[in-house]
Amino acid sequence: MPRMLTLTRHAGDLSCVRAMRTLASGLCAALLLFTATAVQAEDGYALWLRYAAPDAGAAGPSATRVTQLVVAGSPGVPSATREELQRGLAGLQGGAPANGDAVTRAGALLVGTPAASPQIARLGLDLDGLGGEGYRIRSAVVDGHATTVVAANEDIGALYGAFHLLRLLQTGQPLDGLDIREAPRLAVRMLNHWDNLDRYVERGYAGQSIWDWHRLPGWLDPRYTDYARANASIGINGTVLNNVNANADVLTPMYLDKVAAIAGVMRPYGIKVYLSARFSAPMEIGGLDTADPADADVQRWWRTKADEVYALIPDFGGFLVKANSEGQPGPQDYGRSHADGANMLADAVAPHGGIVMWRAFVYSDEEPVDRAKQAYNEFVPLDGTFHDNVLVQVKNGPIDFQPREPFHPLFGGMPKTPLMMEFQITKEYLGFSTHLAYKAPLYEEVLDADTHVQGPGSTVARVIDGSLDGHALTGIAGVANIGSDRNWSGSHFDQANWYAFGRLAWNSDLSSRDIAVEWTRMTFSNDPAVVEPVVGMMMASREAVVDYTGALGLHHVMGRGHHYGPGPWVEGGPRADWTSVYFHRADGNGIGFDRTRRGSDAVSQYAAPVAEVFDDVTRTPEEFLLWFHHVPWSHPMRSGRPLWDELVLRYDRGVETVRGMRETWAGLDGRIDAGRHAQVAAFLAIQQDEAQWWRDASIAYFQSISGRPLPAGVAPPPHPLEHYKALEFPHAPGDTQ
Amino acid sequence: MPRMLTLTRHAGDLSCVRAMRTLASGLCAALLLFTATAVQAEDGYALWLRYAAPDAGAAGPSATRVTQLVVAGSPGVPSATREELQRGLAGLQGGAPANGDAVTRAGALLVGTPAASPQIARLGLDLDGLGGEGYRIRSAVVDGHATTVVAANEDIGALYGAFHLLRLLQTGQPLDGLDIREAPRLAVRMLNHWDNLDRYVERGYAGQSIWDWHRLPGWLDPRYTDYARANASIGINGTVLNNVNANADVLTPMYLDKVAAIAGVMRPYGIKVYLSARFSAPMEIGGLDTADPADADVQRWWRTKADEVYALIPDFGGFLVKANSEGQPGPQDYGRSHADGANMLADAVAPHGGIVMWRAFVYSDEEPVDRAKQAYNEFVPLDGTFHDNVLVQVKNGPIDFQPREPFHPLFGGMPKTPLMMEFQITKEYLGFSTHLAYKAPLYEEVLDADTHVQGPGSTVARVIDGSLDGHALTGIAGVANIGSDRNWSGSHFDQANWYAFGRLAWNSDLSSRDIAVEWTRMTFSNDPAVVEPVVGMMMASREAVVDYTGALGLHHVMGRGHHYGPGPWVEGGPRADWTSVYFHRADGNGIGFDRTRRGSDAVSQYAAPVAEVFDDVTRTPEEFLLWFHHVPWSHPMRSGRPLWDELVLRYDRGVETVRGMRETWAGLDGRIDAGRHAQVAAFLAIQQDEAQWWRDASIAYFQSISGRPLPAGVAPPPHPLEHYKALEFPHAPGDTQ
């Protein structure tokens, strides 16, 4: 595997370097030249698991050396844990330590469970409350030898602890005096792949699906193993393999054999496989003439199908369902409720310990008064009627993964139902894979949002972790940005969004900045001259996208269908709530969607203290102004500027931030390997061009509506509005097929 | 770039090894362990340009060392030549030699043209008749120093010579006493990419298109450069970027900017870019209401479009056109001939030196008496009417890239028109990318076929190289098997089909076995214990596919649409000549398509001596028996067996050959790097399963028609025919979208 290649290379080169240095041989110069080049060459495939040797000079990883590796346990998860530690230490230390069955020397690393390791058992560590996935990392003395201990109740906890330890080494932290206690806040931490069976990825910008269905089960791409390693390293424990716009074929025997093969690769890494289930599958592949959840044959078909799946995959996770949304079939086709549909499927998998994740992203075929209100209106009446093994999966905001949305009013609105967060990792609305946009601040903003449903501190994080309403079944999903591109995510920086999602899924209290720092140190360098500017770019990047695509609460103003580039003029077509004008409502007098009590009254879906703020134009945070209010172009902003001027200046600010990111990155030339530096530089150039395009087209359009002059010193768009409206991109990637 | 990474790694490791050996350091052992692993790790990205250091022990590359590298010339092709030689020698010799402006020491390598290098000019080498692309490689004494000289009339010839020299080193041949004189037989040697603008590849089994249209021109994937290097290394000098089932959008300004960016990467490697032109483009993107080639506005539109293209890409190659075939628009839509259409486009590009390649793969919408006859009937009457810069591109056989077809009767049938060969490199009908099928024997068989149009020796090779009819404009095209898969072609062995196509395009006299040997030595190892068995597998592989998919002249018996797996029962649908029963004509009495004078008379499209053989069931080679004759199941074969028994035994023979290939490959475990060995082993297991499936399903079907018992000792199919007919593969890759 390429990964192993890179590692053994580092190892070999470093051994050389060390030997050479001790010999001052004439060959040293040439040798160091070669090794330096080799060590720096990167293509992104290794993700944040590069296990690179310390950067020459810079404050590198810990000098602590592990002298002996003892991983207790039999094949399966313990073997994967042992291999990962050998691989990681070989890279970080320039050679793998000796393996042992028991600690026999100082500097050992002891990993496992009390059940598998008598030495761990004798330490009598308190592992209560860590559950199966938690772990402790402790500096201890084992049979007289100074040892670093990673202990857990179950093997998977030990694997997570091992990755934590490797992260400490990768980020240059010492191994002395460790006393770490970690357990995940959420039970289900998963990726959703919107991948079709022909390998097309809906909203995918990183090549094809990594699932090579045609060559499965005969060919198990080593990439599957590296995918599992990367996910386990950040605590992800589930993956939905296929698109929520599902094809029933994935439930046929031929495909279930392929799914089982993938599950076999995921198992040693604690990752359960799930499938998106098409609600009409009993008709499409079952030969029934209905999919009515109240029909006995339909119920029997799903029970039998579940038995078939679990016979092949005993630890199968369950089903994810998108029903009665955007044309997908569902229980409402038969006059049944979402709960009727979800419960029928839940009963089929319940005997096997499976769960059903039922998506709340629904809106009827009739155009609603306010699409933002619909999920709440449909689901709140069903609160308390879902069976115990059902999670309702709710997108972070009420519309659809926009660069900024207020939190979804369902959070806090269904106390009797466990709600699962759905974030989008792939950047459908944030510049595809060429724009640098670090999404952790978006995730953090939503998780920290206070619903006030049980008074101050009723954060969205506490809704989904079950602590607010006492739910044990909890979860979070991220729509994956993973594809067949060599660097997995299409761009090197998009790897950070995958990484940050996993870290926040494990612990929502982590700060997006701290996550950016550890990711940067592992992915690029521990050199502060790299870490600080890179983290600075990342932390400014999401707000830049908000600025150049439409700030102050504007939303859904992108190109139609493919969602590539600006489209504030989009109108007409099949339904009003698929247009831009429906959402921004700009006219000669003003702009914004009135969702106050005097308008669509969407504000009333929030708890009173929140509703009052959003209902009051003077108290609504300016970043949500046009989401909740229709205000005059002359509306005075806190800056003292009228809304129109403020909006225009935000577009310019967004472009300016990108320009600054480009400068910063250019300054890192030589400190980042040439391959990755070149691609990021090229993508930042694309981003600057496209930010300018968003800015120019949006200003041209809104000025044609507002009729107001540009603020002094602001450059007019270089082309007339018609130029921007005429641009077409019929082959843009990721559109719904 | 990964390639550079691998190289520098080799270089570094080898310096270590050498240094270590001189020091007998205690670190040696560990070091060698690391480097050994590193050197062996491969993922196929490097293709046949691995430039690997000599295999320890085995008969490795030449011990000759190049001590100095002198490449004469300025930026562009000479720079690419210099970089390739530095890269190659660094890998092969464990370090790049010194660069110089002139030869100053023994063991130098001098590369260039007499115009660029006074030292080459002074040698007075005879370069007459080599043209611009030919070269000489000569061991000579330059200013008193023993030197290897690569000389050519133009820079591109020197680049081709440099790759030839690197091939000598890679395959372990000495550099002493060299006197090589090479020039290509054909002027245009190109790949045809059936790649759509959304990166879907028609009949592609290696991932997405390598052309990342959406991120072009802002992002130039380093893969484009490696693609150019690989093609230049085998003499390919042209590439058609988009599918012959073309989309007119590629001719819009937005896409032409992207095409120009690719052309810029190809230029230093002597590769011209071409585009497939959609005949109705003047209507789709030109706003005209007709595409009639006789219409003055249409002619003007194409001239203007050509001017636009050449303004961006001065060395643009020209257009490839699929017209009036399988639903594509064309001149016949307006009552004009193929010549009318081709000449109109040819006149548009002629002022710029461009050419038009007009495909002869046509068949009318009405179902013909015999589809095999149609291209001949439509094109022969047009012989002599095409303008000078038109090539008519003819598939190797009269149907469509089957595992075996007789040569196309148009070869020899249009003496006044330069005909261009179209081979398929991608394995649409030979097992996609998982079956090992080396196609060079197929290419060789066609090129060596004797048309007899001007007496014995009128081979197809002499038709296309212009020597038979005195044409200067000559060419050959291969439908690419290249995609975004890490190993480019989907499987490691499919790389050999790309390689062999290029080598035969350069010199049709090369033997497929010799090509297999040099490819294997460069791709896997110079170890005879590897070369001999691997070449044996390759040389047997194509006949195995013929056997297990349907031997003795059977053709077009695959699954409908996707062409995956067996489908001899395919009937009905839009047109009879898209079914299997149309082609095999099996009934209770016998099987085969009667194309004799008593049947469709397709035989009469061949020259008399050939026609007489094909018309006579006793003289027709058995591999074409059922192509030309409908014979009884009891027809006596040369083996003495009745046809039915012979056919059944061929199916078994095919499966048996694959089983043997698996055994042979398993025996190479340890001699091939683990990564590539594992994938090939997995694919051979898939191939054996699918060969068995082809065999079982075909025998089950044909036995249901023949009603005859299986020969003694032959195992009956494990399932009833209905089982095989019921299998469906709606998501199989590569189907026409």
Image (cartoon, coloured by chain):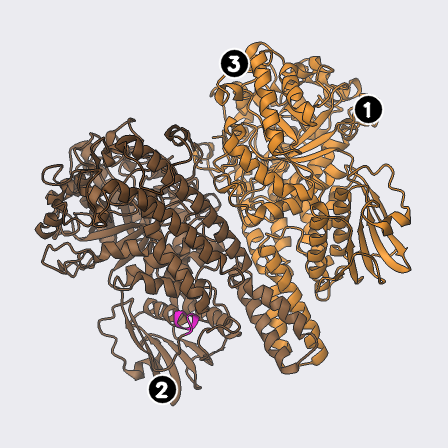
Chain colours: A orange, B brown
Looking at the image, which residue sits at the far top?
Answer: A335
Q: In the image shown, does A505 or B454 lie closer to the viewer?
A: B454
Q: Where is A234 relative to A327, above or below?
A: below
Residue sitting at 66 percent across and 82 percent down? B23
Does label 1 lie on the same chain as label 2?
A: no
Residue sitting at 26 percent across and 38 percent down? B279
Q: Which residue is mark 2?
A: B141
Q: Which residue is mark 1?
A: A470
Q: Where is A568 relative to B357, above or below?
A: above
Secondary element at image label 1: loop
Q: In the image shown, does B525 or A385 lie closer to the viewer?
A: B525
Secondary element at image label 3: loop
Q: Earlier in the sequence, mark 1 or mark 3?
A: 3
What's the mark number on residue A290? Answer: 3
| Segment tinted magenta in the rendering | B167-172
Q: In the image shown, does A44 or A672 lie closer to the viewer?
A: A44
Report if residue B508 is visible in the image.
yes
- Are the two marked residues, 2 and 1, in contact with CB atoms closer than 8 angstroms? no
